[in-house]
Amino acid sequence: MNKALENKKVIVLGGSRGIGKAIVLELARKGAHIVFTYSSNEAEAKRTEAEAKALSPYVVAIQADLTKREDIQRVFDFIPANFGGKPDIYIGVAFPTAQFMPMAYVQDENYELMFSAVKGHFFAMQQAAQSLQEGGKILVFSSGAAAMATPAGGLYGGAKSAIERFALSLSKELGSQQITVNVVSPGVTQTEGLVAPQAMIDALVAQTPLGRLGTVEDVAQATVQLCLPEMNWVNGQIIQVNGGIL
């Protein structure tokens, strides 16, 4: 088994299911020490933790609310307190269920749900910038919706676009510490969180040169590649993992 990330200490914000879970498992295969968060489903998180521990013994699930700064602080404090040393890699995946609706129908609660998560990612990136080892890596998740305008996609695409801008600005600020910051932007990916209307999904698949939905493993493989030491010269990029739709 390739242990290219052996002993690297990694925080995955949102790692209990879907793409986040696939990333946790792939990191574990490569020997990383992992802390991942979950929002509310403890049973599901414990199942993911057990699967990952079969690959690497140092995997811990922690409940955390992305929108609470004290929860984010607690997650970053866990590694020095329990694994020793500073985190090497931060991966921000978590996001509430995407909401697709015409802008005319967006209510305050819809907007607040999307942009409370944006605020959470901002402060999680800030914490990562203050906490990571020199030479560390920050990866945050966007979406193809940030680059491809679609009917009913403005709210979600706008939220993801904001996260992209935060990350790209941060990539210009951390060079003196040799910390890279990149964005992973999946295309249409088959997960339980895929809630776009079926007609929209079908249209997007039809526009994808590879002619299918992405899988969580597709996205996880690309993400973990960006964590490897060989990728130290990749910085300030939006990596489109989308089968060529953009």
Image (cartoon, rainbow, N blue to C red):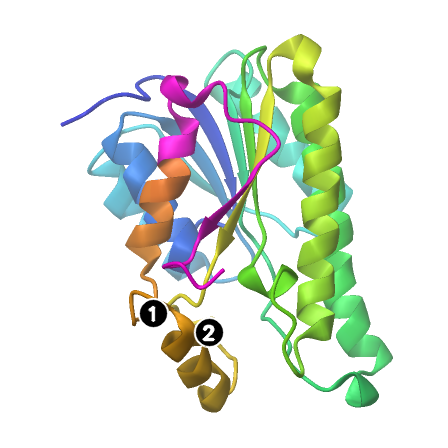
Tell me where the magenta segment starts and ends, as one range. 225-246
Residue drawn 55% across the image and 19% down it: 81
Report helix, strand or loop for mark 2.
loop
In the rendered image, the quadrant that contains the N terminus is top left
Look at the numbered discs 2 and 1 and tell me whether their residues touch, using CB distance below 8 Å. Answer: yes
Q: Is residue 16 visible?
A: no
On screen, 36 above or below 86? below
Q: Is residue 8 visible?
A: yes
Which numbered circle lies on residue 213?
1
Task: Give residue 97's position: percent from left, percent from top.
Answer: 58, 70
Q: Amino acid at mark 2?
A: Leu
Q: Nearer the viewer, residue 187 or 20?
A: 187
**Residue farthest toward the right in the current orientation of the protein:** 108
Q: Nearer the viewer, residue 54 or 170?
A: 170
Is residue 145 on the magenta stretch? no
Which numbered circle lies on residue 194?
2
On screen, 138 above or below 165? above
Residue drawn 53% across the image and 23% down it: 79
Please identify the quarter of the rendering in which residue 55 is found. top left
Is residue 233 on the magenta stretch? yes
Q: Amino acid at mark 1?
A: Leu
Task: Give residue 176's position: percent from left, percent from top.
Answer: 69, 9
Task: Give residue 195's position: percent from left, percent from top.
Answer: 50, 79
